[in-house]
Image (cartoon, coloured by chain):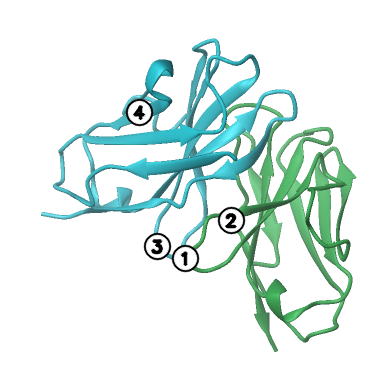
Chain colours: A cyan, B green
Amino acid sequence: QVTLRESGPALVKPTQTLTLTCTFSGFSLSTSGMCVSWIRQPPGKALEWLARIDWDDDKYYSTSLKTRLTISKDTSKNQVVLIMTNMDPVDTGTYYCARIQAATVIIDYWGQGTLVTVSS
Amino acid sequence: DIQMTQSPSSLSASVGDRVTITCRASQSISKYLNWYQQKPGKAPNLLIYAASSLQSGVPSRFSGSGSGTDFTLTISSLQPEDFATYYCQQSYSNPYTFGQGTKLEIK
């Protein structure tokens, strides 16, 4: 079955760089039509779509955050990495990775999420 | 970016009620509209995709409709497990923006 799991630091300081890893199983990012996205959610607030990477290495970013985000994949390890620079307390929240199938463009599987707190 | 606006932001209802949540896109998105349910401390769960298609395993009391810019999610008869927050999301163009959410609470 399809599973995704996020990992990374629970606490980062302001101005630091956050690196999150999504490790998945049950599908391959080398398969045509497979994509992985990152989505975040500040405490008590709405979901915010951050980035997406496709099987063919196409990449898409949030307009407001694109200067701070980099998404990449390691197909051999079944991992997707998100890097976010210059972290700020407003970036505190739960970060989810999720699978998208390009044909239907729906998020059909989510990870459990990882809480990242930005504080000095 | 396409802006998604949900209404209401919160809603109180009783078990057995019929409930409708609306979502409006800032431009036409055809039928590229999905609905998710999220319970506290959990990842969202897909309910409806392509505006009106029921995801496998989702109870038939959930339904979706609409196209273009205006969409609705209807729960025909609320069950205790339906009290949660609901989000719409457009998948017409990147970035795939979400609505601000509708919190459905027990009256």
Mark closest to the chain's N terminus, 1 or 2: 1
Q: Nearer the viewer, mark 4 or mark 2?
A: 4
Which SS class for mark 2? Answer: loop
Res. A67 mark? none
Residue B95 as seen in the image, left or right of residue B104: left
Mark 1 belongs to which subunit?
B
Q: Where residue A69 appears, x then y in whole percent? A: 35, 28
Q: CA distance from mark 1 to mark 4?
A: 23 Å
| Tag 2 and tag 3 share a subunit | no
Question: Mark 1: few, some, or many residues within 10 Å (few <14, many ≥20)?
Answer: few
Mark closest to the chain's N terminus, 4 or 3: 3
Q: Which residue is mark 4?
A: A81
Which SS class for mark 1? Answer: loop
Q: CA distance from mark 2 to mark 3?
A: 13 Å
Residue A94 as seen in the image, left or right of residue A45: left
Q: Are marks 2 and 3 in contact (CB under 8 Å)?
A: no
Res. B100 mark? 2
Question: Mark 4: few, some, or many residues within 10 Å (few <14, many ≥20)?
Answer: many
Q: Is residue A98 above or below residue B102?
A: above
Q: Are marks 1 and 3 in contact (CB under 8 Å)?
A: no
